[in-house]
Structure formats: structure tokens, C-alpha cells
Image: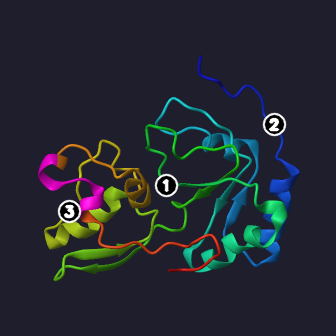
Amino acid sequence: MIPQISQAPGVVQLVLNFLQALEQQGFTGDTATSYADRLTMSTDNSIYQLLPDAVVFPVLRRMSRFLPVWRRSRAFTSLIFTPRGGGTGTNGQALNQGIIVDMSRYMNRIIEINPEERWVRVEAGVIKDQLNQALKPYGYFFAPELSTSNRATLGGMINTDASGQGSLVYGKTSDHVLGIRAVLLGGRYP
């Protein structure tokens, strides 16, 4: 039997301490610990349910201040973080009982479209249909075609190497990724 969320447990004190430390470090994104906010992040397109302790919504420019907070303190090394895009994965990969790092609220900008060289630069929370709408005037689109393309984010597609209808012709997501810039655990950008 699949476990179901049957009660509204409180937030673990360690998580509250972490969120307070974030605020003290100047974190300018949003955080959420209410049961309603956590419940919305407890499911994805899979059959699983995991109620997180908190949700963090980082702003990319401030991301470098986010991760180093828990690396500096041994108290926070036991915390579990999971990035989340649109929650369209079917294997529960966007779920955890720790802290969800939601990429879709603020990290959803199309930064640059270079039609001559046929590439784009986007943030992880850009939705596939949003990107394709921006590419349409240039006669381009981002493949593969997904049934969840109106909510699937590019970060999530890269994470799962999404494929779908037309992937035999156009390839899967990894066939269209030229590079990734990510924030590492120490807060560095490689």
C-alpha cells in the first residue's frame, strides 16, 4: 500500500534554524513552512506523497548566498535538499521530506536567444511551452514533445533527460543541451 499523508506534522526545529540562518545571510527569495504550502509540494506526477519540512524559492542572483549557509555549520549537513521544477516527473524525483528548492517561481527567465547560432540561455524554471513560444518567431522549437509541456521546466527536463513523442526524430533532452551552469555545494559557480 502506498503511504498517505494523514496528519499535519510540524516543522522540524533544525529546518526552522536553517531558514533563520538564511534570512540572516540576506537571502531574498521566499520560504514557506505552512502546511498548505508544504502540502502543494508533497506530490508530483507520480503516485508518491512526501510532505517536505519547508520550501525555498531562490532568486538566481542571490543563489550564491543560499547553499553556503548549511555548508558552514555542521548542524545543517544532515538537511536534505531537492530541486523542483514543475513537478511533472513520474518517479517521485521532485519529492523529499526535507527542503524543496523550487526553481519555477523566480528562476524562470529566458536570458538570451541566439537564432544565428541556434541556442538559448535559460534559467532552470523556464517552462517548455514558454520557451517554445519565444522560439516560434524564429522558426525553432525545443524538442522533445511532452504531454506536460505546459508545466514541465527545462531544469526538470534536464534532470530526468526527458524524452517523449518525436524523440526518435528529434532526440531526447540531453541531445539539445550545450552546457549547464550550476551552483555547487560550496556556493561556487563552476
Estimate how packed mark 1 is, as few (under 14), some (14 to 19) or many (20 or more) residues with alpha carbons within 10 Å: many
Estimate how packed mark 3 is, as few (under 14), some (14 to 19) or many (20 or more) residues with alpha carbons within 10 Å: some
Q: Is residue 3 above or below residue 66?
A: above
Q: Which residue is mark 2?
A: 9
Quadrant assignment, res 30: bottom right
- Give the spatial CA distance, label 1 vs label 3: 20 Å
- Residue 132 is left or right of residue 157, and the answer is left
Secondary element at image label 3 = loop
- Residue 33 is left or right of residue 121, and the answer is right
**Residue 170 lies in the magenta-colored region:** yes
Identify which residue is drawn at 16% across, 83% down. 116
Q: Which residue is mark 3?
A: 141
- Residue 62 is left or right of residue 151, and the answer is right
Secondary element at image label 2 = loop
Residue 69 position, x and y percent, is 75, 72
Q: Quadrant of the N terminus?
A: top right
**Could you tell me what secondary structure mostly forms the magenta stretch?**
helix
Residue 85 got which mark?
A: 1
Query: Where are the magenta residues, as a range?
Result: 168-175
Identify which residue is drawn at 56% across, 31% down. 48
Amino acid carrying mark 3 in the image: Phe
Sequence-wise, the earlier of marks 3 and 2 is 2
Q: Is residue 69 above or below residue 160?
A: below
Estimate how packed mark 2 is, as few (under 14), some (14 to 19) or many (20 or more) residues with alpha carbons within 10 Å: few
Secondary element at image label 1 = loop
Sequence-wise, the earlier of marks 1 and 3 is 1
Whether residue 88 can be seen here? yes
**Tag 2 near tag 1, CB within 8 Å:** no
Amino acid carrying mark 2 in the image: Pro
Residue 46 position, x and y percent, is 48, 34
Identify which residue is drawn at 68% across, 72% down. 66
